[in-house]
Amino acid sequence: MTPGSGARGCPPTSYSPLCGGRPPPNEIPRCPTCKVQRNFDKRKVELGSCGRPYGTPCQHEHACIRCPVLHVSPKMLARLEEMEEDLLARRDRAEAEHWLGEVEGINITLNFLRAKREDTRRRTQRPAVDLGIPVTRPGRETR
């Protein structure tokens, strides 16, 4: 490690001392520019974020709308509307051309899209829960 650099080649941060230049427990880096932070950055997709487990590949080949672990951002509801219009136009063309397999695939995608949209709308209607600010109880030691 060179002087002035953080552990594992990461830039120095307030978290770098936690890495300490040695592998942390369970090989999970603790500084924000290490693998875990990059993993969360990779979870950001066009429509929101991906909820698949850390270190796993995308089994849907980035066909996110069909993926059960896609979390759609409420900001992207308008984009879902655009996607639905496009899919409906594609389905009309597929029906006109008698591409039955394509029609079936588009119908499946439309069902997933509509379910994601309704789930996102439902989540935006739920009120936020105030959990309060945690406080330590008198007479208890902190670790």
Image: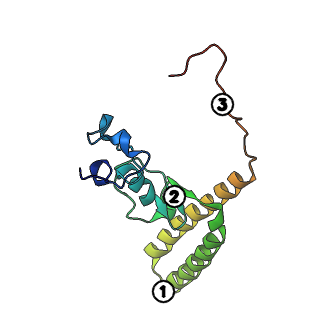
- Hey, which quadrant is residue 28 in on the image? top left
Q: Nearer the viewer, residue 141 or 92?
A: 141
**Type of residue at label 2?**
Ser
Q: Which residue is mark 1?
A: 97
Q: Which residue is mark 2?
A: 49
Q: Nearer the viewer, mark 2 or mark 3?
A: 3
**Type of residue at label 3?**
Pro
Task: Say if mark 1 contacts mark 3, CB within 8 Å.
Answer: no
Q: Which residue is mark 3?
A: 134
Q: Rate crowding at label 2 as few (under 14), some (14 to 19) or many (20 or more) other CA atoms within 10 Å.
A: some
As helix, strand or loop, the secondary structure at mark 1 comes to: loop
Q: CA distance from mark 1 to mark 2?
A: 35 Å
Per the rendering, the mark at residue 137 is: none
Task: Say if mark 2 contacts mark 3, CB within 8 Å.
Answer: no
Colouring style: rainbow
Sequence-wise first label, 1 or 2: 2
Q: Nearer the viewer, mark 1 or mark 3?
A: 3
